[in-house]
Image (cartoon, coloured by chain):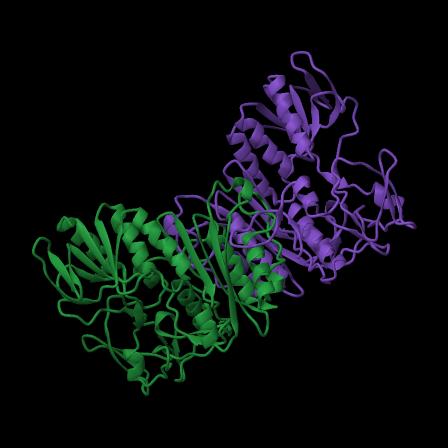
Chain colours: A green, B purple
Amino acid sequence: MPYYIGDVIEESKRLVIRTPEEFNKTGIDARVRTHVEGIDAQKGLVYLSGGMSIPYDYLVMATGAKAVRLDIPGQDLEGVFSLKNLSDAIRIKSWIRDKHCRRAVILGAGYIAMEMCEALQTIGLDTKIVYRGKLPAKKWDPAFSQVILDEIKGHGVEFVSGKKPLAIEKGKTGSLQLVTDSGVVEADIILMALGVSPEVSLAKSIGLSIGEGTGAVQVDLTQKTSRENVWAVGDCCEVFHKVAGRWVYLPLGDIANKQGRVAGQNIGGSPMEFPGIVGAQAFKVFNLEVAATGLTEEEAAQSGFDPVGVLIWGVPVARSMAKGEKLGIKLVGDKKTRKLLGGQLIGKRGAVQRVYALSVALWSGLTVDEVGYLDFPYTPPFGGAWDAIHIAAQDLARKLT
Amino acid sequence: MPYYIGDVIEESKRLVIRTPEEFNKTGIDARVRTHVEGIDAQKGLVYLSGGMSIPYDYLVMATGAKAVRLDIPGQDLEGVFSLKNLSDAIRIKSWIRDKHCRRAVILGAGYIAMEMCEALQTIGLDTKIVYRGKLPAKKWDPAFSQVILDEIKGHGVEFVSGKKPLAIEKGKTGSLQLVTDSGVVEADIILMALGVSPEVSLAKSIGLSIGEGTGAVQVDLTQKTSRENVWAVGDCCEVFHKVAGRWVYLPLGDIANKQGRVAGQNIGGSPMEFPGIVGAQAFKVFNLEVAATGLTEEEAAQSGFDPVGVLIWGVPVARSMAKGEKLGIKLVGDKKTRKLLGGQLIGKRGAVQRVYALSVALWSGLTVDEVGYLDFPYTPPFGGAWDAIHIAAQDLARKLT
């Protein structure tokens, strides 16, 4: 019987493990808070801090990602945090409480920055996002990024654009100050939400193949690396993008979960291949749902497609129930094959709902014409007889002709 | 340029027509509130009430459906209404207002009955549903119907089960009384929400083929009937069910819209086929989302499949954000092909979202194994790393093995 570390599934009898102690009860030797100093892949040995070593038949690399940090003076000062794991979160909360923080600065404007600005603003901090570019969430169409910007500003977050951070120093009025190429920003706490990169130092030390464009461990669809009996899963390795038709780096928790299961099945003797991803992702910021799946026009062109996009403003519910609220939907299709390549949605509701559907359409390789006639559950509180997806897909189909 | 009667699409330049007057402005002769007395299909003539006739080259039958009425004495009394069109709604609202109604009885327990009981209870009427069976919404699994029953009862609606209506009479204390095989129920208004059947009298008069099991006009994928130059669309005709692999009767507004567009394109010289449906449907009752798509186990068996079902209780969001709320999901798969055949969901949120996705999976003919690894946008306010769909599909995959 397989063991899962995860959530309890009601009405199912599977064994659920939540803590290392529970894990140890299964008879499996689980060692947390233990540092791996090195690996001898010839001998099949993992060297731990303190001099101990553990032999292995199968090795699974699940080293994850590391938070990107700016290479500027003062980035290691107290009160400057990156965002990676639970202990970061605990340290950040303690700092805010113990130092009576009033002003927060977030560097970066991706979805983690968006989630953090909501969290900090909501607990009462004056929150500023300092970003080199003009608009947040650059994966999304600029028209949608503008809606995100309006949403965070509307909730009191300040968006300081076009500033390049040069250094972090002890502050005059606050505990810290961020020095940029155009002025100084005072803060009691500074968060670096600049993304992550794959943690591959151990992988490199045993000569695993690393993807050229991605910097992540190369795996096949069974999660096996370039070395026999060594597997890799999660944020340290690549994943196959079904729409792009190539291996990419996309460090997301759901993908890591699936890869772990796939590697476990293969090592455990129930062979399976990971079918790949389509790039589905979403976040919520204040009252806004922001979601995307598949490829942007730019990504599609890089993958050899001939992309065409449409962007329309529809409604998330039947028009009679809409009360003025809008749902933005952008679809991208391929001129050669007429296949759907990607979609983005934004709105106070209904965006995530539709990216679920579009993700399955991408997974299945549907054409834009097919998407224009998909069967959705028409019910006025959740969508019109012609859903926003239909309308956008039919508009796109006309543009592809 | 084609004309659409429908909603304004922002940032699109298409002509939108909302009223007969606007329609007439296009130069097309639109006659509403005009009764068709007969058709001479040999001569290509439609006879109107009042003796006029109109010649045609192409005839589109869009005669819709008629509300099913119980064949019991007193069903034509004032205060007894069926639910079909806008004028029914206006008459019902006037009756409630003019007669100062306090007590409503609804006959039937399908989704229209559910929507009506919420509407009436919400405006302050004591609302009773009188139904022969034990549970509402019989398309859904009994476990889900029980949740619906709890929801309507929790909002004060009384569900009177196991009673067969025998007659409607002038009431003693109220304006009406419903006589059943076990007692009398007093009411100021009685609504018959007993479903609809196709309106095919004109179609039969010109010898159009009628489906044996459905009673609806038979069409091909271009919406053409058995007679040259005669087309049919909407609630009067059949529709092709992609999962069942056969023609069915499913009178839903979104299907009617699509069929109308398909017929129009074919008549107008831009040939296309209607790709069919998968049976997606949903309703909201009080705070509950109820949704279904594809086939139930019973329907699947009737269509020649070897169906297996699973029903689990998951959560609509990441478990850490769930606050005790549950999402019920039932999936049905085929033992022979391992294909997904259908799905049902119920919960305070997230049910419709997931039936969107399952509908695309059905449309695309995905296997249960594929559904277990679909790529959804993992974001805690809308779903866990393993979505309820994944968990149910993986449970089902194990049962199919």
Q: Is residue A1 visible?
A: no
Q: Which of B254 and A149 is in front in this view?
A: A149
Q: Residue furthest top?
A: B172
Instruction: Judge from the rendering whether residue A119 lies leftward or rightward of residue A60; answer left or right.
Output: left
Across and down, in percent, residue A249 comes to: 39, 73
Residue B170 left/right relative to A257: right
Q: Which of B319 and B89 is in front in this view?
A: B89
Image: A234 above or below A185:
below
Where residue B37 sits, quadrant-wise, is top right
Residue B29 vs A112, above or below: the answer is: above
Q: Is residue B119 left or right of residue A60?
A: right
Residue at the spot 86% in from the left edge and 54% down from the top edge: B227
**Where is residue B49 drawn, in percent x and y?**
84, 34
- The x and y percentages for residue A29 are 32, 68
- Reply above or below: B318 against B74: below
Report the front residue among B299 and A150: A150
How far across and how far down the image is residue A54, in percent?
28, 77
Residue A93 falls left or right of residue A256: left
- Using the rendered image of the protein, determine whether residue B141 is visible from the camera's viewpoint: yes
